[in-house]
Amino acid sequence: MAASIVLPFLVLLLASSSLSDNIDFTYNGFKSAATNLSLDGYAHITSNGVLQLTNDSYKVTGHAFFSSPIQMLLNTPSVTPAAISFSTIFVFDIITVGNGGGHGFAFAMAPTKTLNGSCCQYLGLLNTSSNGNSSNHVFAIEFDTVQGSDMFKDIDDNHVGVDINSLVSNISKPASYYTDNFKMVDFELESGQPIQAWIDYDGIAKILNVTISPFYVDKPSRPLISHAIDLSPIFKEYMYVGFSSSTGKLSSSHYIMGWSFRTNGMARSLDLSHLPLPPQPAKSSSISKATGINIGVISSLVTLLLVAFAFSVSWYLWRRAKLAETLEDWEIDYPHRFPYRDLYRATKGFKETELLGSGTFGLVYKGILPRTGEEVAVKKISNNSRQAVREFVAEVVCLARIRHRNLVPLQGWCKRKEDILLVSEFMPNGSLDTFLFESERCGLLSWDQRFKILKGVAMGLAYLHEEWEQVVVHRDIKSSNVLLDAEMNGRLSDFGLAGVYERAKNPSTTIIVGTLAYIAPELSRTGKSMPSSDVFAYGILLLEVACGRRAIESTSPTGKLLLMDWVRECKTRGRLLEVVDPKLGQSYLREEVELVLKLGLVCSQSIPEVRPTMRQVIRYLNGDDSLADDVALVF
Ligand SMILES: *[C@@H]1O[C@H](CO)[C@@H](O)[C@H](O)[C@H]1NC(C)=O
Ligand SMILES: *[C@@H]1O[C@H](CO)[C@@H](O)[C@H](O)[C@H]1NC(C)=O
Ligand SMILES: *[C@@H]1O[C@H](CO)[C@@H](O)[C@H](O)[C@H]1NC(C)=O
Ligand SMILES: *[C@@H]1O[C@H](CO)[C@@H](O)[C@H](O)[C@H]1NC(C)=O
Ligand SMILES: *[C@@H]1O[C@H](CO)[C@@H](O)[C@H](O)[C@H]1NC(C)=O
Ligand SMILES: *[C@@H]1O[C@H](CO)[C@@H](O)[C@H](O)[C@H]1NC(C)=O
Ligand SMILES: *[C@@H]1O[C@H](CO)[C@@H](O)[C@H](O)[C@H]1NC(C)=O
């Protein structure tokens, strides 16, 4: 008798206790996750670490499950089985070429990771005969982009649904999120923009919450779906957890960029600023603008010229290679070539202890050139096709001619099989981001130093945009690409490489190489980099330097701070100086800090045409022009 009174209490205790094998994993990109995921069908991890479930073709299916089964049910002989609480966060992106993609994807939990589900509306989860059968033990949250035939009872072609053993959802809602004052904002799952999703299940209250929002919106406090459901009859004791997707006549590429999952606790938030981005489809964006000087047209002309240049160079090289047979021959034609032997010795055989860090394109080593004793940084870019190597070298040699005191000079190159090694001057003080964000390790940058660095970067960038013989768009302005020389001057590294890398790597698609938080909004739409998109990123850099905070920062396990929004808000409230890096104390020039913050906002406006040029930015920073106090900002 006593036992039966104690039992319900015990169940409660058990459900929240550590009697189950708790699981907690976080993948900010999947580069390191390959061994922990079981992939099938089309699913694979792209070279930059994005999990791709399907590509954009007819009837493709893909699954990706965490390799080990996860305990989801407390199933002790004496008590009622109880579903275990879990929480998961992931960032996805659905990219469609042309009109109308499909069919969506699902976050799925199933007793097996070999789901042989059908394509199309079945999202790779189930099939005609298994659909709706309670022996499936399949739980899924569908992100559905097609309104299926009547039997699926889809509410529209852009919804989120809770699926229990069936693709007919038990509850579904059009893709949207609630603002803080409970206004509902609709958005497109298929927007081609990263979207965050949170799924939280409370095994004791038996409440399932599903929340989604575009990546730049923090987790909405009110979930899109909050559904009372007991998952214990659906779960088996051990379940596989992951993603399933398929295409049909309508097709899209479905990508997951980051994923964290946890049982009995809140999933850890993802580091949004470090997630890899999926490749953007090459689109011939129609640029139609009414402004007199059309920077877009100029830049497309320059791109065309560059493409034509790259094309003729590669044709020339191809012919030469045919005639000469040995690859060595074309290599000899390019100046600034380093013998591999020298670089191998300089870096002690690319030893791990010599590693300076990993950049956008590959690992960077410190080296001492054996012949001269000169200190250099050696960047190793691996796994290129032969064609890519040649194009790369042709363009890198061209970039190596660029000299400016605020740019890190590229000294030369070397090729070794599929690897390209780039040699540049060694910058003894490392990169700006470590000073800003790890000051306990590197020491604090004074305001004067910061201001000088920002001016330097502006001059380097203006040179690339307006003064060199071609327009060079940097494409990856961020604090870790600002290096500091012995006099603590700010110098931009990796200029132009993003463009070279993009063209050489895969001529048919445009890859946005930049880093999430610094990517101008128009860039993820058009994929076309312009000087104005560098200005956007420079604006974000200005804010980071003045505030001593990252462009996107986790403030709590669930909350995120988008620096730009915060600064705007403080400015609107007339309390701009509240955002200033507290580590500076009162040691800064108020006018300069205000200038930097306002200029940061002016540069990071969403409409490219209203951003200033880098030349104009320098005039503001030097006090040659003054930034009107009430400058109208267009966001
Ligand atoms: C991933 O796999 C590696 C190697 O198999 C293992 O050491 C590691 O613990 C796994 N990580 C997780 C989160 O399971
Ligand atoms: C998509 O994947 C399928 C199967 O791997 C492949 O045959 C097809 O060529 C791919 N399509 C595109 C557009 O990449
Ligand atoms: C899927 O197919 C594989 C191999 O054909 C089989 O081993 C597995 O049991 C099947 N899974 C289901 C859920 O039927
Ligand atoms: C449907 O799926 C079930 C379970 O995976 C499998 O046993 C069955 O053969 C499939 N039926 C069809 C028609 O594909
Ligand atoms: C449900 O699936 C089980 C196992 O595959 C099968 O024995 C049963 O007949 C199915 N039920 C229905 C209603 O199709
Ligand atoms: C989900 O919906 C199906 C069909 O409407 C119903 O049979 C089932 O009981 C529902 N499941 C839960 C757990 O609510
Ligand atoms: C689910 O949402 C409701 C309503 O906002 C909230 O009260 C509850 O705490 C949430 N539960 C979980 C597990 O997130």
Image (cartoon, rainbow, N blue to C red):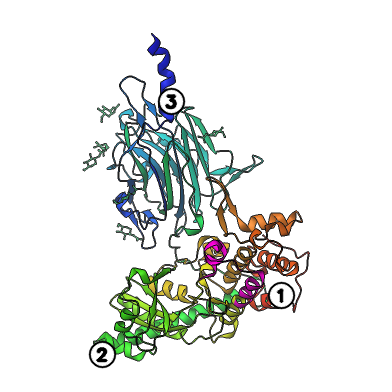
Quarter the N terminus occupies:
top left
Precedes in sequence: disc 3 or disc 2? 3
Q: Which residue is mark 3?
A: 13
Amino acid type, label 1: Tyr
Tell me which amino acid carries mark 3: Leu
Q: Judge depth for marks 1 and 2 and give the one in front.
A: 1
Q: Is mark 2 within 8 Å of ligand 2?
A: no
Q: Which mark is residue 323?
A: 2
Task: State the residue position of label 1.
Answer: 620
Q: Which amino acid type is marked by label 2?
A: Leu
Residue 618 horizontal side relative to residue 508, left or right = right
Prevailing secondary structure class for the magenta stretch in the rendered image: helix
Label 2 secondary element: helix
The mark found on residue 497 in the picture is: none
| Quarter of image, res 203 | top left
C-alpha span from label 1 to label 3: 63 Å
Pointer 1 or 2: first along the chain: 2
Tell me the SS state at disc 3: helix
Q: In the displayed structure, does residue 172 sit left or right of residue 2?
A: right
- Give, as a single range, the part of the protein colored magenta: 431-456
